[in-house]
Image: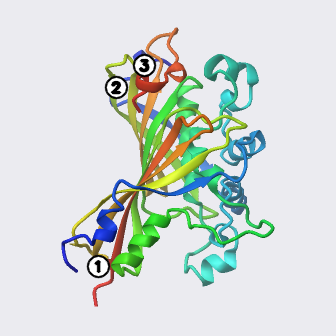
Amino acid sequence: MTDELPSEVSTRIGAIQYEEQGEFPVEQGYIWTSCASVENGNPLYWDPDTAAEITGGPIAPPTMLSVWFRPHHWAPERTEQALPLQVHFDLKETFGLPEAVMTDNTIVFHEPVRPGDLLRTHQILRSVSEPKTTKLGTGRFWVIDVEYFNQRDELVGVESYTGFGYRRQA
Amino acid sequence: MNLDDVSKGDTLPTLEYDVTATTIVLGALAARDWRPMHHDHDFAVNRNGTQDIFMNTPNQAAWFERYITDWSGARGRLGRMKFRMLGSVFPGDTMALDAAVQSVEVDDTGCGWVELLVSLTVDGDLKTDCTARLALPTDTDDNPWRRRGDQWKP
């Protein structure tokens, strides 16, 4: 493995890839299902008066950001979909690295997400390391941002993933 | 809760929760995560080689959020969360969430912030940790949720 990044990778760094529109608007029912799953009684999600006073109306829990992009389990006449974090799988393929792990995940929250919002997203490769050897094997680390926007083009959040694609030691 | 009520080194009350298969399945479906290792015992054990179905990452994030805002109240506004996943949570586990305040500061826009280190453990084994940056009101008239654009630096 050479230290030099192939041009097909270096030209991808900073580029917007895999723009995608959510399949459905943010909905109140899913907000309640999520809150129920963790017994979250925050009145922002249950009491319209509190939501009106504090957040200017109902909002979704910030950590639900990625929920709005998981596709239906089935949909009629669906064509093949990009995998979540397709950039990660592209890099594994480009470098011929069969294994990968996510080493950490950061979510930054911006404008609140509200019922009725229709979000869009894209992926941006931020960096790729030189070859590294860890106890897992030899490969490269990369950082991928997934940026989320609402229908008013306001940034609502950014997820950053650090991945390590590698080949096990022979 | 206001920023003045918090000091570095403060700890949050422990939340203990007995995890069942329903906890795992409900959490996965609430996150629209249909992958079988979060609801199909046979798949989890015989295909993934895990001891049982296990809690998915987005649902863990929801548990961390609930734990943090139970403490802060509704005016607490999450700015950032960083997760390290170290192990899995299975039905039959009693998970415990604990946290300590790492820092308290006011940024150059006047927004009050605390940084929390939150841990999810089972029988003392660390499964996930989360560093969370949470905005808290600086006084009774302040509301971090009103901040937009360059007044919000999460």
Q: Amino acid at mark 1?
A: Gly
Q: CA distance from mark 1 to mark 2?
A: 39 Å
With A64 as the anchor, is B40 left or right in this view? right
**Residue at x-position 53% and y-position 30%:** B71
Q: Which residue is mark 1?
A: A137
Chain name for mark 1: A
Mark 3 / mark 2, whichever is N-terminal: 3
Q: Which residue is mark 3?
A: B3
Residue A102 on image: x %, y %: 41, 64
Where disc 1 sits, the SS reads loop
Q: Check if mark 3 and mark 2 are on a common chain.
A: yes
Give the image quarter of residue A140: bottom left
Q: Which residue is mark 2?
A: B104
Comparing B100 with A42, the one in front is A42
Contact between marks 3 and 2 (CB within 8 A): the answer is yes
Comparing A118 with A103, the one in front is A118
Q: Amino acid at mark 2?
A: Val
Comparing B8 with A151, the one in front is A151
Quarter of the figure with the C terminus of chain A? bottom left
Q: Check if mark 1 and mark 2 are on a common chain.
A: no
**Residue at x-position 42% and y-position 19%:** B3
